Amino acid sequence: MQTQQTMDAHSDFLTVRKQLCDFEVAEEEKKGNVLRKCSAASTNLRTSGNKLYRSKDHDKRTHENILSLYSESIAFAPVDSEELALAYSNRSALLLHLHYPEKSLIDIVKALGITKSTYLRTKLLSRKAKCLELIKKSADREDNSSDELKIPKFTPSKQLPCVADCVKVDYNKQFGRHMVATRDIEPGEVIIAETGHVVFPSGEQMYLNCSNCLRLAWTGIPCDFCAFAIFCSETCKKEAWNAYHDIECCIIPYIFLKQKDKSLLSHMMITARIFITAVKREGLEHIMHTAEAIDNQDIHAQNVRTTEEFNCTKFKYLYNLSSHDQDIIRHYGHAQYIEEDYLLSVLYKCTSIFSTFQKINSDNKELYVKMFSDIKKIIIKLRNVVSINNFGYQIVGDKDSDFDYDVLSTNSMKGLLLAPCSSFISHSCYPNVSKIFMPKRKMVMMTVLPVKKGEQLYCCYGPSITENVQERQAYLLKNYYFTCECEACNNNWTLESFNTLPQISEVDNFYKFVQDFNKLKFTRICEDLIENWSIDMETIKEVAEVCKVLSKNLKKHSALLYSFYYSIFLTNAFILLYQEKRHIPYQC
């Protein structure tokens, strides 16, 4: 039981935190670190964009930076201000410069609806006429960032609707919850097609991508109140407001002020979004009871092996994901709890999310302190869940015809996504499943190797065979708290391992292998170099057949060695065929 002294100290702490929040914001604004909509900040950002726009050499990165600066200027501009009209006008000029007259016209109309300047109206009307002329001539550059990308069909599981019925969730002490095949699975089958529960854009791309769905926001719409959210459409803006942003909007400036490391900002904001969404949907009292029940028993093994349908939007399924609480405490100590304290403090001070809590009689300090303590535990657990289970939402750029071992770069990271069902897939440095990121925060997983009935499915959490074993192990231990024992790590495989394969005649079932291999008819993969293979469905089918023959006739170790380059081809092919593409032009 809490002592009176402890309860008084906690109450005093909350009062001090309220005062300190206001003081910190005031001090930062004195330094020029603006946290709210501000005409001067909007003008400075727009001026920076104009400077880049007037530079001689433009490439994709330049265009991306200009678009980001103009959209950030729009986000910081006060509602219906002349600064907002100017920012829309400048972005419309960029979009026309990039040969997107239809998109340019959208911003022109917005600017015309705001500005009171005769000079600006004249410029906008002239640009509008040019856009209409180009549209009439069908001069709009093709935009490859489609919302409707088709994937192969699959039969969904009754219990896990976003998961194919050819896999199931299993449990053991080594892997915890993981997925295994319920039948033989061929390369190219969809295993999971899941819409992420929450996302948040990465720091560098916060004004390029929609805060709600991560779609590239060419004509991004700002939040009317805060300066830290851009949306791709009014639909996303409304959806975000109803789900979480009405609360998040009040605290996000404080979080930005406190979190200096922008790489960790997404983790904290996703945590906040999960908590806010859960409270709004299910109620604070309900999620507190749910959290207590989960914390008091180990239900990791059975909670997805009942007849109940798994619903990733329900708090209990999110809260019960793997969190490695004790590992994180051992690694970081209790220092990380400062951030959770701060999040709890600003939620209490700046929002009405704890309205039930705030109605408690202030004389009942014991209950008051206990509730704060319980809520803090929930936020800490959710933060750990996010750290362990998030996916980096990555996309393909423009050079999508090049074959590469690592198509995606750090610059392709749009943000973080939490997809609960997908997090049941374990890691391997040589995975049999490929991740594909699609529009509207959808993530799909497809097999790139044959998977036999009863075998486990694996995706790659980050490090792969392109890195040495020591680097892979260090990364996984630091970020996921386990030592990888996949086939590649156990055999010390790196890229060089696949350049000196054993002779075919030395492998098992040689004659059966030759017999089955000779039955295959190749028309698409005759070229010696995989880089020269066409990426189409016929080629994919031929490559998949080769992998099946290897898996059928060779022992697993040998089959994996010989299948490596085929699996790399399939990984790249599925990404290039199905994954969202962001086409920001290299040339003007």
Image (spheres, grey):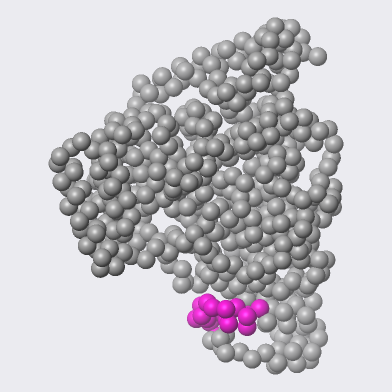
Residue 477 appears in the figure:
no
Q: Is residue 133 above or below residue 317?
A: below
- State the residue in front, 33 or 183: 183
The residue under the point 55% across, 24% down is 351
Residue at 67% across, 76% down = 563
Whole-percent x, y for residue 342 in the image: 58, 25
The verdict on residue 538 being magenta is yes
Q: 8 and 31: which one is in front?
A: 8
- The image quadrant where one finds the N terminus is top right
Look at the image and give the residue range highlighted in magenta: 528-544
Picture quadrant where residue 337 is located: top right
124 relative to 362, above or below: below
Question: Observer-nearest residue: 233 or 292?
Answer: 233
Q: Please indicate whether residue 51 sits to the left or right of residue 491 in the image.
A: left
Please name the residue shown 67% across and 9% down the image.
362
Q: Quadrant of the C terminus?
A: bottom left
Q: Is residue 75 visible?
A: yes
Q: Is residue 490 left or right of residue 98?
A: right
The x, y position of residue 459, in whole percent, is: 67, 60
Total labels: the figure holds 0
Q: Establish if 286 lies above or below 359.
A: below
User: Can you tell which quarter of the image residue 133 is in?
Assistant: bottom left
Magenta span dominant secondary structure: helix
